[in-house]
Image (cartoon, rainbow, N blue to C red):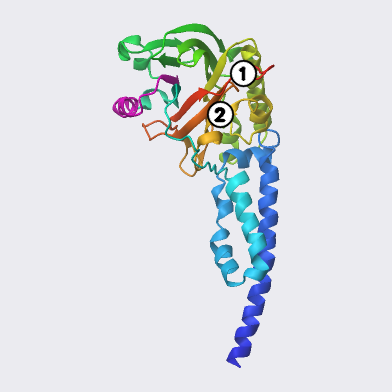
Amino acid sequence: MATAVWENVNTRGRIWAARLSWLYLALAVGAWIVLRHGDDWWPGTLLLYGPRWPLALPLLCLLPAALIWPRRLLFPVVAAAAIVAWPVLGIVVNLPTANAGQRHQQVKVLTLNADGEHLNRLAFETLLATETPDVVVLQETPDRLLEKDAWGSDWRVQAAAPKLLIASKYSMRPAGSLTLWELGGAGGTMACRLETPLGTMHLTNVHLDTPRGGLEPVLHGRDTSELSPNAELRDRGSAAVIAWLADTMGNVIVAGDFNLARESAIYRHYWSHYGDAFGERGLGLGYTKFTRWHGVRIDHVLHGSALKCTDCRVGPDVASDHRPVLAVLESSGPAAKGERE
């Protein structure tokens, strides 16, 4: 009798586990599709900038079940786990290259949304001393760091509204700035020409508008009506900055707080033709903006095809709500013909 009962339970368990596994695979595929419409369709926007980690929780039960009943469950569970890990959660995996550790002429860039006066000055100075970047790109710069005297004689410093700053150990000259105020936004961008070991480089500091204006009404229990106008504002901002960058020449780095995840329809339309440093040489989730419940990668170091990234990672907490991004870039040869630089 006991054996018959156990076999019945085991059979029912297999059936329900198989059903749930295929249902979970369908959920993972659906989340992937919805995510691709982030900043283009409100459910995708909520998923894009909201917590995605709950989508991985069913694996806590389904993976052990797949080990017990592999014939029925192995394919849907493994397929769903792969979709959740890579396209949905955005985990990046890069293996070490054959020439890792070899010394080349390089430029090391650090970008950080400093969160104004919240930045811990000692932690930031320790970060600079430890990482020794060649170029620092700041958004929401604290007032004390906007002063050239705060940086010392090794640094050349340029600043522009809205509280954007570029500090460089190379000789540098300003190449213009742009605010998005006339579009109704609060962001902006500034550029400098740097004389680096890789040649003359056009470096752009970007701070685009946040999706918070569309998301906060949803979080406070109101409707989703602000999501679409907010996405349109941010689309206009990216379009304006891309148009402003169209005439720049030479090696190109665009770094800063884009307030855009890579899966965003806005990001893919305007920014995907640049190389993404973390996507090329990063490892893990690479979250750069943190809330109480989750993180998202919205700070980026992008580059033109005349450059390649050899190392990129997210730095430590310096008391900002963003984390610094550090990228090491070197020459990859002549820029591609027709590239927007």
The image position of residue 209, as x and y in percent, is 57, 24
- Percent x, y of residue 54: 56, 52
Image point (43%, 10%), residue name: 158
| Neighbours of disc 1 within 10 Å: few (<14), some (14-19), many (20+) | some
Mark 2 vs mark 1: which is more N-terminal? 2
In this figure, which residue is indicated by the disc labeled 2? 259
Q: Residue 146 appears at what percent x and percent y?
A: 38, 13
Quarter of the image holding residue 105? Answer: top left
Q: From the viewer's perspective, is 168 left or right of 259? A: left
Q: From the image, state whether disc 2 or disc 1 is nearer to you.
A: 1
Vertical comparison of 23 with 170: above or below: below
Residue 94 in the figure: left or right of residue 241 = left
Decide if residue 52 is in sight here: yes
Q: Say which amino acid is labelled 2.
A: Asn
Magenta-highlighted residues: 120-138
Q: Is residue 24 above or below residue 337?
A: below
Tag 2 secondary structure:
loop
Q: Is residue 159 magenta?
A: no
Residue under circle 1? Answer: 335
Q: Quick one: 130 or 33, which is closer to the camera?
A: 130
Residue 240 % position (x, y): 64, 16
